[in-house]
Amino acid sequence: MAAESSQTLERGLRLLRLLADGRRGRTPTELATELGLSRPVVYRLLTTLQNEGFVRRGGDGRVHLGFGVLVLARAVQPLLREGALPTLRGLAEEVGATAHLTVAEGDDGLAVAVVEPSWTDMHVAYREGSRHPLGRGAAGHAILALRQGRTGYVVTEGQLQEGARGVAAPVTGLPWLEASVGVVAFTALDPAVVGPRVSAAAAELGRALA
């Protein structure tokens, strides 16, 4: 019984991960094919997950993540923030720029942790809870790059705030999290210097959260 229950839980989690990949939902048949399961098994999983609010069925019959997932996400965000602060604080002080952890929520990026440098005369004010499309700003571009299998740092300028320059790198090795670590400043950021430091911070955070 224990082995069967564990297998059911594993299948349910795999199903949720599939639905979290940013596509516009899937039919039960598509889920069965991608998971390598029979349709009756998938329907049983969907019934349980739908009853708990973790998936929902659209008018076209396609399956999407349900709003119950947001409750879990809100509970995780304070833990992410707490775990990220030491890394972000070190990055902000070393680079002299505002450091941040951004996570993907659908097509948006959400800043869950922000640390401003203590010794600079001027720095970018970036509010925790800020949200922006993934297609704008270094943080979002880094997450989109991760979805395409690219793990290097990215550089942008003026996409979220005029005159602001950003450098960000994706957090890798965490299949349950799409996130990036980045810095943003009004002063010039040398990508050759700052980029590797941001990538190192993203890798450090990935190890800390693993």
Image: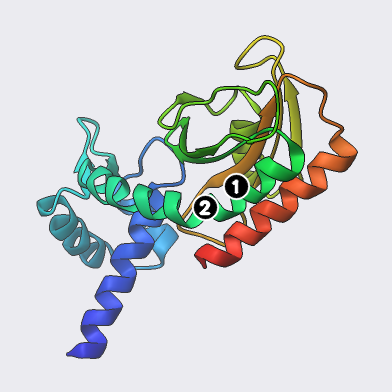
Could you tell me which secondary element the residue under label 2 belongs to?
helix
Residue drawn at x 75%, y 35% as measured from the top left: 154
Percent coordinates x, y for residue 174 in the rendering: 53, 60
> Which mark, residue 203?
none
From this view, report whether residue 114 is shown above or below residue 10: above
Q: Residues within 10 Å of mark 2 (few under 14, many from 20)?
A: many
Q: Name the residue under label 1.
A: 88
Residue 87 located left or right of residue 169: left
- Check the picture and name the quadrant holding the N terminus: bottom left
Check whether the beta carbons of the residues at disc 1 and disc 2 lie within 8 A of each other. Answer: yes
Q: Which residue is at the front of the view, 82 or 181?
A: 82
**Relative to 104, residue 32 above or below:** below
Mark 1 and mark 2: Cα distance apart in space: 6 Å
Residue 84: mark: 2
What percent of the width, then of the height, locates residue 139?
A: 61, 34
- Compared with 112, 163 (above or below) is above
Is residue 151 among the parts visible in the rendering?
Answer: no
Looking at the image, which residue is at 54% across and 46% down? 179
The quadrant in which residue 118 appears is: top right
Q: Which residue lies furthest to the top in this view?
A: 162
